[in-house]
Image (cartoon, coloured by chain):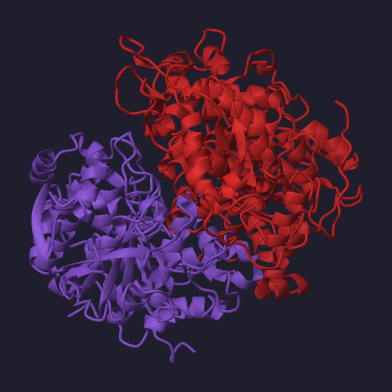
Chain colours: A red, B purple
Amino acid sequence: MADFTPLPVHPDSLSTQGVINAGGSAADRTAIIKVKAPEPSPSLTPQASYRYLTDAEWNEIAVRKVLQVFAYGGFASDAQIQAWADMPPVSAIAQMLTFDKVNLKLSPADLYDRLDLVDSTLIGISRHFSSGASRIPGDEKTRYRYSTLHSASRCWYKMMCLRGINPVRNRIGYWATNYHMAANFNASVSQDQLYDYYDMIMNALAADLSFDQVLAKAAVHSAMAVQYRHYRYRNYDFGNYFRPDGSWHGNENFGREFFQLFFGILGYSKAYTQEYHEKITIPQMARALSDIWLTYHDGANAGWDVKATYGTAGQFKGPLEILGAAVPGETAVDRVNVVAPRAIANDESLRNLPVRIVRFIADENMTPETAAGLADLWGRLPKKSLLDFLRHYAISTLFHNPRRVKYWNTIERNLLHTNMVTTSNYETYRDFYRVRDFIEAEGQKIFSLDHNVFGGQTGLDAANNSKTFKLSYDRAIERGYYYMRQKDGTGWRKDWGALVPGDSVVATTEWLWKRFIADGPSKMGLMERYHLYALVGAGVDLAWYVNPADPYHVFTESELAAGESGSSSALGRKLQALRNMATGLRSTNARTRAAANGKMGAAIAFLIALPQAFAQVGQ
Amino acid sequence: MAETLNRRELLTRVPPTLATLHALAGLWPQRALAAPPAISGKFLLNVHLDGAPDMRHVFAPKPDPDAASPAHQFWKARSAVYGIGQDFNSWTNAFSAVYDPVSFSGVDFGILKEAGWLKRQWDLGRVAIINNVFVSDSRDHVFGSVVVQTGYTNLGGTDRNRDGFGGRLVKALNANVIGFHGATQFCYAPHPSDPTGHTLDRIISVENARRMGFHQSNGRRVNRVDTDSDAVVERSLESFYRGKDPLALHPAHRNFPTFEQLYRALGKQMTDRLAPIVTPEALVKLAVRDGNVRNEFRACYESLLCADILNLRAGYIFYGGWDTHDAQLGKIKELVTDLFGDSKALDSLFSSLEANHPTAADNMTMLLAGEFGRKLRANEARGTDHGIGNSVLVIGKQVRGGLYGSMFPQSEVGGGVDNLYGYDNAGGEIQGLTALEHVYGVVAEHIQHGIGTAVSPRMNAVMVERGGLLTSLFK
């Protein structure tokens, strides 16, 4: 895979490229423009200030942070992660972030099932999982069948946790269909439509179409027509169309959200007023979206068409005016294809669209400076390629800075932790770690969206909700034994020893910290460290280990610091003993190894309920 | 420190340091009472009508044959919503079929028949309809939702991290706000140093009041100390969270020790309090379409029984689904039924409180608002698209019922296409004449005299439809 050349940055000024006058005569616009609407932004324009990481700054932790955000950890080996860390960031990122179905460096094939040889589109994986050729247990295969209710979500969760399939592709598919171009089962979008919608978007992104082309395809898809209810159906009286007498019949819902949600355009452009946006662009966009037909099919596979058809009889005859320019076309597709490239070049979209993308994917603590930097970066892309944008972003100080916070939503956090605890596809097929159950126990489901067209649960929603925390905390106690499983009666054995860097408790704990938290050992406090040492090394809690007669003792950082520095004290001796322990993960004794793997599980149960497991902070 | 602060202050006002964590364990008394004590002060229940409800579907004018009347224009512009013709008889028939007629100060209008409880409250003089309220002119649900929850109508487009109305209210009351739908922005408290930020100090999320305690290991449940794996993980986490100074964590991670502390401090007391109390069937089996709504109203009732434990003075309920653009009346009828209908959500909550905890019913003020209004005219899909002004409801025994602000302004008639707030303009909208800050400030002032401007700083500086509009909102 070829490297890419990072774009230059101008740290002291925003890009002015791409700001368009949306066209149309001034007289036309002023005819309906009464007052220039105030812009809803601070009076001082923040300055873009960012750069790309140097080779020295790009290290193992930087790689791990990228993998957590863009691949929910991914499945790359430690050696591969180190290899990426040793490369120039532009070379590494081109290998790490791809939208192809397979990325063997990031998600190596597992000989158990060779999913790299399978069509891992959503619909393709459904066919595979439900077939005799898959490793899905026989009595579960029907749950993954295309026609089975909830099969799309089951397939997606499973796919995200399996080696051989590119997790970046499906992480972005999740963002695209659950946030940016949200399609919601609860709004009557059918599963058939969702399968097609998801794969259409991801195939378009994998083909590296300009993002406006991807958005245009999504906008006229049946899933959006149902989501926003602008489709025609016989004489049913909803949907957008013109009657033969030329009268308009429809609503403006997607006429507005097409701009707002897809492109980040709310009407605060330099080229026209908000009044113009409200009175001309939105109503006329609704008309551009007219005469999208869906037919309902009765019978065994009852449901709306997956592939919409685009009529001409119910379309407005002649050009419409949208974003200040004439929009000719015979069908909705024609019109959208004219509007989309203009929309993505619109000044407001250039400012807002990259922020919308990054806010959902990677940064919920967006500062005005970051927003300005993102606009600068996006504006410089000669082609608005989402992949190119994300690659640039992921090796820039826009991503790698301590102000960036990615709060994990329920789906993300559970997938990340499951991927980090899973060491083979066998474990995923056996569903040892119950990721779907855990997610649904927290009240979340992919494709069933808390905020409807505005997307699913955000990371901030989750982080601010004490109930979400409580459920995770409770689960560590109640279901922590899932992570402690060492064997299953078929000959399978958990083998952390094959992955950890040695047999030392200290090295193993630091490795766990990097794997699950994507942070350096220096960011590990003494309390995190010694609680983990006790679990990994002794298999009991720290208080019990130090003094079984005082099992509810509450250690503090200062107490541990004093103990660590005073090795002659009772506590000091205990702490030193912990530091000197071996895990037993590489013992020649099978029982010792099994017990050591169980201790690792207890440590993981503890680790994923720590505060640091709920949000990733940039560095 | 522990002796000079009350328990709740210790939990909410002071950064949860080691000292306070340790102190809490000894200071928190058990209060499992057979019957809950009377609620200590006025309580605000905020019901967020998410999705920008068209309140003119809920309250419609009685048809008027006079073509120059707002009522006539309303029915002419919205006959499609009702699937009827453009004639006066059709309008009259539809009005009779869909609405229960009421009259107030010469304004004849109807309340949607599905809103049986609301109509009864109106008849009892407990419903204030504040008209032409301005929340946001962005017509953007996400931004509008931020504004309606914060109560700042002058927010910038990227200014989305501010404190909420409920958070400011309980800060002024030195109390707490409960998020029955999680900790939404309404509940965010002001940040002590960052005016663009917030804290979560005063929020308690209660989605199941009877399960506020942490899961216990098998051993602990029977007072056995062992090294079973669940007990080992349990003690490790408890020791870590009790011992960790949150200030040693990155700010993004500090919520979680606070949550842990909160559940540990409150869980057992609430469980003990509620254990002998039977929640009324009306709430347990509340028949509404959305199970989350049932849970929220049930949690609200049960939390009010623990108001002293929680130091509870405000609550937030999310009631979404109003963002519709087609075949709208049917959908709104469903939403109105579940919220305002006889034996439905508000009725069940209010009647259960009146029967079992009357001081809570007496002291409760309900505030219901959405993020913006809708267009004056219906679209051709039998719905209405995004607009600006809308009506806000304030309901309670201490409310002086009636209409506040012109319900169907004469200014909406005539003026041609130049009248942006008139029926003649295809995109005409309800004009926002009273800023939300004023409404919020007046409500806060009612909850406790003297805090209005602290909670809604611009309450007296923003536009109000006419002077003294809300002076008599409360008895």
**Does any portion of residue B77 appear in the rendered image?**
yes
Question: Which residue is drawn at the image coordinates 27% and 44% (left, top)?
Answer: B77
Q: Is residue B280 left or right of residue A278?
A: left
Instruction: Using the image, determine if residue B184 lies above or below residue A68.
Output: below
Q: Nearer the viewer, residue B421 or B161?
A: B421
Instruction: Using the image, determine if residue A13 lies above or below residue A278.
Output: below
**Does any portion of residue A554 appear in the rendered image?**
no
Number of numbered discs on residues: 0
Q: Nearer the viewer, residue A397 or A582?
A: A397
Q: Is residue A478 left or right of residue B207?
A: right
Question: Which residue is drawn at the image coordinates 36% and 67% (left, top)?
Answer: B433
Q: Nearer the viewer, residue A373 or B257?
A: A373
Image location of residue B212, percent across then percent down? 35, 60
Q: Nearer the viewer, residue B231 or A222?
A: A222
Q: Quadrant of the C terminus of chain A?
A: bottom right
Image location of residue B236, percent across then percent down? 55, 59
Q: Quadrant of the N terminus of chain A?
A: top right
Q: Quadrant of residue B407?
A: bottom left
Q: Is residue A59 left or right of residue A71?
A: right
Image location of residue A429, percent across then percent down? 55, 23
Outermost residue toward the bottom in this view: B4
Q: Quadrant of residue B266?
A: bottom left
Q: Quadrant of residue B264?
A: bottom left
Image location of residue B469, percent across then percent down? 27, 77
Instruction: Using the image, determine if residue B447 lies above or below residue A379.
Output: below
Outermost residue toward the top in this view: A132
Q: Is residue B173 left or right of residue A604?
A: left
Question: Which residue is drawn at the image coordinates 66% and 71% (left, top)?
Answer: A557
